[in-house]
Image (cartoon, helix red, strand yellow):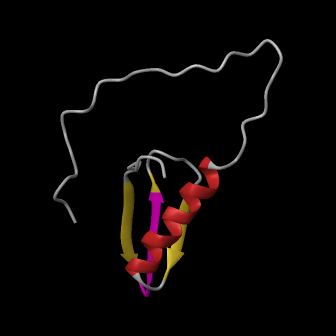
Amino acid sequence: MGETMKFRAMIKKSGEWWIGWLVDLPGVNAQEKAKEKLLESLKIGAEDLLNVAVPFEAEAQMTTIDITEPAWTLEGGQ
C-alpha cells in the first residue's frame, strides 16, 4: 500500500447538515447528516478524483513543481 496523503478539509455544520470541501482538490465536496459520514464522503471523493487517469496529449509534458511548506499548520486542530 502507498503512503498516506493529507488534504485540507473545510467543514461546518449548516442546519441539520454537515457540509465540507477539500481546499487542495477543487471539486471534492460533500454534504451529510453526520460529521463522521461527511469526512468519509470527502475521503471517497478524493480517492475517486485521484484515480482518474490523466489523458496523454501529444506535445504536452507532465512535470511536478516543488513549493515550500507553509509556516502555518492545522495539526492539533479540530
Placement of 12 over or under 56, stated as above or below: below
- Is 30 placed left or right of 3 in the picture? right
| Residue 48 image offset from top left, x and y in percent | 63, 57
| Segment tinted magenta in the rendering | 14-21
Image quadrant of residue 24? top left
47, 73: nearer the viewer? 47
- Is 16 placed left or right of 52 in the picture? left
Q: Residue furthest top?
A: 59
51, 24: nearer the viewer? 51
Q: Residue at x 16, y 58 (%)?
A: 76
| Residue 67 image offset from top left, x and y in percent | 36, 23
| Residue 61 image offset from top left, x and y in percent | 68, 15
Quadrant in the picture for the C terminus: bottom left
Kindly report the secondary structure that dominates the magenta region of the rendered protein: strand
Placement of 71 over or under 32, stated as above or below: above
Q: Is residue 39 magenta?
A: no
Q: Residue at x 55, y 47 (%)?
A: 26
| Residue 28 image offset from top left, x and y in percent | 56, 56
Placement of 69 over or under 14, stated as above or below: above
Q: Residue at x 58, y 61 (%)?
A: 45
Q: Residue furthest front?
A: 1
- Is 73 placed left or right of 57 in the picture? left
Q: Residue at x 56, y 65 (%)?
A: 44
75, 22: nearer the viewer? 75
Placement of 51 over or under 45, stated as above or below: above
